[in-house]
Image (cartoon, rainbow, N blue to C red):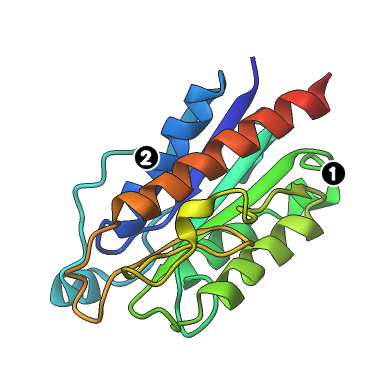
């Protein structure tokens, strides 16, 4: 059975919800899925002052060597000024040994993100994730336009050909819509099916 890791960082729960949807899609495609988060690196005073969500449903992945156990890794993080969060970047910065040994070469990778606005750097954040994954040797799967629900302007929608996305609004009040969650499920399913084909 294909093993998929959904690895995320979430400050306010938007990316956590998207991670669960990615996992749902991968499981629907027959994969064995783990959902893990990277460690919080912001000082406790900042976490409390900013009102970060601290009751995450998923365990922390501390050791990058665990990444090698999976056939596919889907990485999610909110955008921070057009790039991945420092928490997620910091985790990958500790994975030099994994890179040096080529432990992720040939595995499948994908990305998802959120931002406050529709033009808040979602695509550049996806690229910042995908660039990392390419350096580690992963084969990239995007959302593409096979997921048609991202199209149209009848409502605010996330989605990009490079990965699943959602829009949180400036105060974080907008939760992922069904169209956004559908994109995450589609991405998870696509990743799982691709990984299964490459493993044959």
Does residue 99 lie above or below 43 as drawn? Answer: above
Q: Which picture quadrant has residue 174?
A: bottom left
Residue 116 visible in the snapshot: yes
Where residue 14 appears, x then y in whole percent?
Answer: 30, 58
Picture quadrant of residue 170: bottom left
Location of mark 2 (residue): 20
In this figure, which residue is indicated by the disc labeled 1? 101
* Left or right of residue 177: residue 182: right
Gap in Å between the C-alphas at discs 2 and 1? 30 Å
Label 2: few (<14), some or many (≥20) within 10 Å? many
Q: Quadrant of residue 13?
A: bottom left
Work out which quarter of the rendered image holds the N terminus and state it: top right
The residue under the point 47% across, 71% down is 85
Q: Residue at x 72, y 41 (%)?
A: 108
- Residue at 82% from the left image edge and 50% from the top image edge: 137
Disc 1 crowd rating (10 Å Cα; few below 14, some 14-19, many 20+) is few
Q: Earlier in the sequence, mark 2 or mark 1?
A: 2
In percent of width and height, residue 16 lies at 33, 50
Identify the residue shown where x is 78% and y is 25%.
197
Q: Is residue 168 above or below residue 195?
A: below
């Amino acid at each position: 059975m294909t093993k998929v890791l959904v690895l995320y960082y979430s400050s306010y729960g938007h990316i956590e919800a998207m991670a669960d949807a990615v996992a749902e899609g991968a499981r629907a495609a027959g994969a064995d899925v783990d959902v893990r988060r990277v460690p919080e690196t912001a000082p406790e005073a900042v976490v409390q002052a900013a009102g970060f969500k601290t009751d995450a449903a998923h365990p922390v992945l501390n050791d990058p060597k665990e990444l090698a156990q999976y056939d596919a890794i889907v990485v999610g993080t909110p955008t921070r000024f057009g790039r991945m969060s420092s928490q997620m970047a910091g985790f990958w910065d500790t994975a030099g040994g994994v890179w040096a040994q080529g432990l992720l070469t040939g595995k499948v990778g994908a990305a998802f993100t959120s931002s406050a606005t529709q033009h808040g750097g979602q695509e550049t954040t996806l690229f910042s994730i995908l660039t990392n994954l390419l350096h580690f040797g992963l084969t990239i799967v995007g959302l593409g336009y096979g997921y048609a629900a991202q199209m149209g302007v009848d409502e605010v929608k996330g989605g990009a050909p490079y990965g699943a996305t959602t829009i949180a609004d400036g105060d974080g009040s907008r939760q992922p819509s069904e169209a956004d969650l559908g994109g995450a499920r589609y991405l998870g399913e696509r990743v799982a099916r691709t990984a299964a084909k490459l493993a044959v």
